[in-house]
Structures are given as structure tokens and as C-alpha cells.
Image: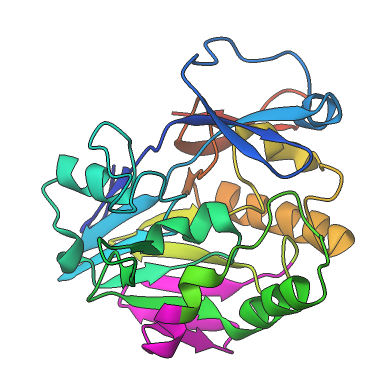
Amino acid sequence: MKVGEFSIEHLSEGQFELFNDGSLIKTDAPHKKKSSKLASELYEELYLPMGVDPILVRGKGATVLLDAGLGIGLDTKKRDPAISNIITNLEIFEVDPSEVTHVILSHMHHDHTGGLAYADKNSRITSTLPNAKIIAQRSDWEFALTCINENIKYSDVPYELDNLFRLVADQQIEFIDQENMEIIPGIEIIRTGGHTPGHQIVRIRDAGETAYYFGDLIPNEEFLNFTMIPDADVEESDSRQIKMLLMKQAFLESAQVLFYHSVHLKSGKLTRDPNRQYVLSK
């Protein structure tokens, strides 16, 4: 996909089932048919099918990742080239991990941060993307620390921060407090809250074209039209309102919408059906 000068690719780590205890299990059986049930109904039946798809954005001298995946198979003692993760996926596009200049974290849940670091052959925590500036909202990190320290479960996917402490100590993660910030010309973060207190989205604009990455506010096409899942969003009422505003904006701008957790459609533009419900077109 192209948005002006920027090229955009999904780095698929495969398909998973998210269970309502927060566990993620990789499945080799593809979900070939779209379920007739709502995402919330599947979740109530204990599981929800989903993809894990970090997004690679290249252009204007920068190589940017939008979230970093689960990192399965990265640890040196477990490394298996057959397991799809951030390194194996970057290799497909002939990108060396050292070439990544920025990582924008929508939030700190493990399925978005696990690919940032791994244990090397000496069991030292090592950055997967050694030259990247990792950008996260300070409020999201502080909320994650509170959940860990007080053993509080606010969401469907837990926090796992052990490897991230190394990156924080090395000052590779830059915590920001701004609601809006241009990372490079044409790539802007916008703090939304909702899913987590410091959740942020990404807007890509160039040459009159626009794309939005909504993180876990709208993780896949099943979540258009404001479907909610119990316990998925910390600020549920805020999240619903923000989703409505974001979809309206993307619709009016004829923008591409990029999904992180889609099983079927990874991106598309929003249109409306005869019932004025949002639907996705390629």
C-alpha cells in the first residue's frame, strides 16, 4: 500500500485465539470463513480469533514500526526461523532490524510490545531493534506499572514488562506526554485513551492521502460500528465515543484504515451500507 511517499506493509505473525483469561494460543488452522457471530458473542464463548500484525512504514528516510508483535521465538535458546516474528518478517522485506528508526507503541500490552526485546545466548535482555527510538505515552507506562505492582487485571491481555525495564534503563524508550506529536514529517501520533489511559493512534498523511492506525480501539473489521467486548477497554464510555469520532473522520477523509488484529481484511476504506453502518471496502 502507498500513502503518498510512504509504503505500508503488514508483518503477520499468524493467527491466534484470545481466551477470556487473557491467554493467547497460536493456531495453525486458518479461520477461512467469517463467523456470523459478533466478536462479543465469541468472547463470551471463551475465545476470540485474531491476527497479530505489526505495521511497517517506510519513507522520507525513516523506517517505522507501528507496534512490535508478540516476539514468539525470538529468544536465542528458542530461535526458530520457521516461527514468524518481527525479525523474520522484516527479512521478507529485506529490512535489517538495525535499520528501524522508530517504533510507535499504541499501548503497552504484551501482544504489542513482546517483539521489542529478547534473551540472548548469555540470557541477557537485548533490544531487537537496537537503533530504534521507541515512543510510548508516559501515562500508559505508569498505568502498566500500577497494574503489575498492585496485581490488577483491567484488560483482556496482560502486561509483561520484565524485558522492557532493560530498554527503559538504556533510555531506548522515549516516554511522551503530548496529546499530538509529529514523529517525522507526515507521521503523527494522537493520544486517545479509551482502550488504556495512554492509548495512542497514528495518522499518516502525504501528498493528499491519509491512513489511520487505530491500535486496539478498532483492532479489526469486526469492531466497526462500536461493538464492545467486556473488559477490553479500561475507559469504556470514552472508548465508544472516541471510536465513533475516529471512524467518522476516516470516512470523511476517505482514509485507509490499518488493522493490527484482523484475521481477514488487514486494511481498507470505510463506506456505509443502506443502514448507515460502516463497512470496509478494499
Q: Toward which corner of the image does residue 60 lie, by quadrant? A: bottom left
Point out the residue furthest to the front here: 122
Name the spot of residue 71 as percent of width and height, x first.
Answer: 41, 51
Relative height, residue 80 to residue 167 (above, below): above
**Residue 60 in view of the camera:** no
Q: The C terminus lies in which quarter of the figure?
A: top left
Q: Who's the residue at 72% across and 60% down the image?
A: 195
- Camera-side residue: 65 or 8? 65
Range shown magenta: 166-193
Relative height, residue 114 to residue 137 (above, below): above
Q: Who's the residue at 45% across and 59% down the image?
A: 67
- Camera-side residue: 165 or 202? 165
Q: Who's the residue at 17% across and 40% down the image?
A: 92
- Camera-side residue: 69 or 176? 69
Q: The N terminus lies in which quarter of the figure?
A: top left
**Residue 165 in view of the camera:** yes
Name the spot of residue 162 as percent of width and height, x first.
Answer: 53, 70
In the rendered structure, the answer to whether residue 174 lies left or right of residue 236 reads: left
Name the spot of residue 90 as percent of width and height, x first.
Answer: 22, 49
Colouring scheme applied when the structure was drawn: rainbow
Name the spot of residue 7 as percent of width and height, x first.
Answer: 24, 51
* Residue 168 lies in the magenta-colored region: yes
Q: Who's the residue at 82% across and 43% down the image?
A: 228
In the rendered structure, the answer to whether residue 83 lies left or right of residue 48 reads: left
Point out the residue furthest to the top here: 33
Relative height, residue 93 to residue 56 (above, below): above
Q: Toward which corner of the image does residue 262 lie, by quadrant? A: top right
In the rendered structure, the answer to whether residue 67 lies left or right of residue 94 reads: right
* Residue 208 lies in the magenta-colored region: no
Number of callouts: 0
- Camera-side residue: 37 or 168? 168
